[in-house]
Amino acid sequence: ELFRRKVVENVGFDSPLEGYPGLMEVTKVLNTRFKTSDEVKAVSKRVLVSLFPSWLPPAFRAMFARPFPEFSLAMNAVVTALACQWLMGRTTLNEVEVVDERAKDGEGGAGTRLVPGVKVERCRYLEESGCASVCMNSCKFPTQDFFREDMGLPVTLEPNYEDFSCQFVFGKAAPAPEDDEACNTPCFNQCTFKKPARPAGKKAAGADDANLCPGRTLP
């Protein structure tokens, strides 16, 4: 209820439907009301920030993220897995191997290390929205930005648009959108969103607006 109330406050619309269907209807308005994906991402991040007392993120950065980064990553993975199942569905804690430029392999190249992760087995939010753009612009990118900018932790979300799973990787810096594989994924055939929206001044060569879902981040 808190999450939905914060979304409603920032979007200026509420649904008469109760429960998860009502939340998804509000989410649809969030992703169609604004003209660009940047606006959708900014509002979505504002929702995430509003879920916490204003003093908490800066205090966490100073007391945990900076002096105890590894512990902070593991703690946030646990909290994410426990607190977000109602929104995303079943989650499990795991470890993910990532490239570590500070370590060297046997041939002098970059080594690897294990970092905490959360595996969403089948994301309810993605599946019920039926839209890759909704995933990217109202979940993936705002969440990554929130952890980096407000909590002081690098986190990457890696959605799988074939099986609707998602891997949270705590300790992996998120790539730039133009280098993110998720941005190169076409939306689903069953996507019900019709109104196109793009970052200002950006349009893919030969792109057909009629086939773009709202907020789609174009390379």
Image (cartoon, rainbow, N blue to C red):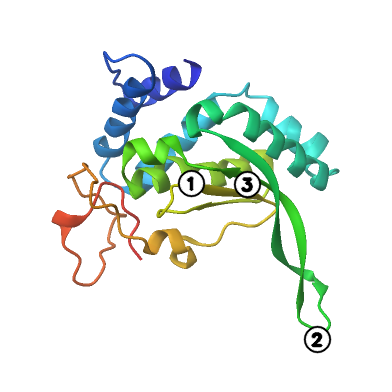
Q: Nearer the viewer, residue 158 or 40?
A: 158
Measured as percent of width and height from the top left, residue 1 is found at: 47, 15
Secondary structure beneath dot 3 equals helix
Residue drawn at 43 percent across, 59 percent down: 182
Q: In the image, which is nearer the foreground, mark 2 or mark 1?
A: 2
Residue nearest the observer in this picture, 91 or 4: 91
Instruction: Give x and y (percent) for residue 163.
Output: 43, 51
Residue at image x 25%, y 44%?
Answer: 35
Q: Nearer the viewer, residue 32 or 133?
A: 133
Q: Nearer the viewer, mark 1 or mark 3?
A: 1
Query: How crowded is the residue under tag 1: few (<14 C-alpha within 10 Å), some, or many (20+)?
Result: many
Task: In the rendered structure, find residue 140 and report the number of the disc placed on it.
Answer: 1
At x 51%, y 33%, the residue is 89
Indicate the position of residue 15 as horizontal and vertical percent values. Answer: 28, 18
> Mark on residue 148?
3
Whether 216 is drawn above or below 49: the answer is below
Q: Is residue 150 left or right of residue 10?
A: right
Residue at numbered disc 2:
107
Between 183 and 93, the residue placed more toward the observer is: 93
**Res 135 → quadrant:** top left
Q: Position of residue 217 (x, y in %)?
A: 35, 56
Q: Earlier in the sequence, mark 1 or mark 3?
A: 1
Count all numbered tags in the image, as a single digit. Answer: 3
* Amino acid tagged 2: Glu
Residue type of the residue flagged with mark 3: Arg
Dot 2 or dot 3, earlier in sequence: 2
- Whole-angstrom CA distance, mark 1 to mark 3, is 12 Å
Tell whether label 3 touches label 2 (CB within 8 Å): no
> Closer to us: mark 2 or mark 3?
2
Q: Secondary structure at mark 2?
A: loop
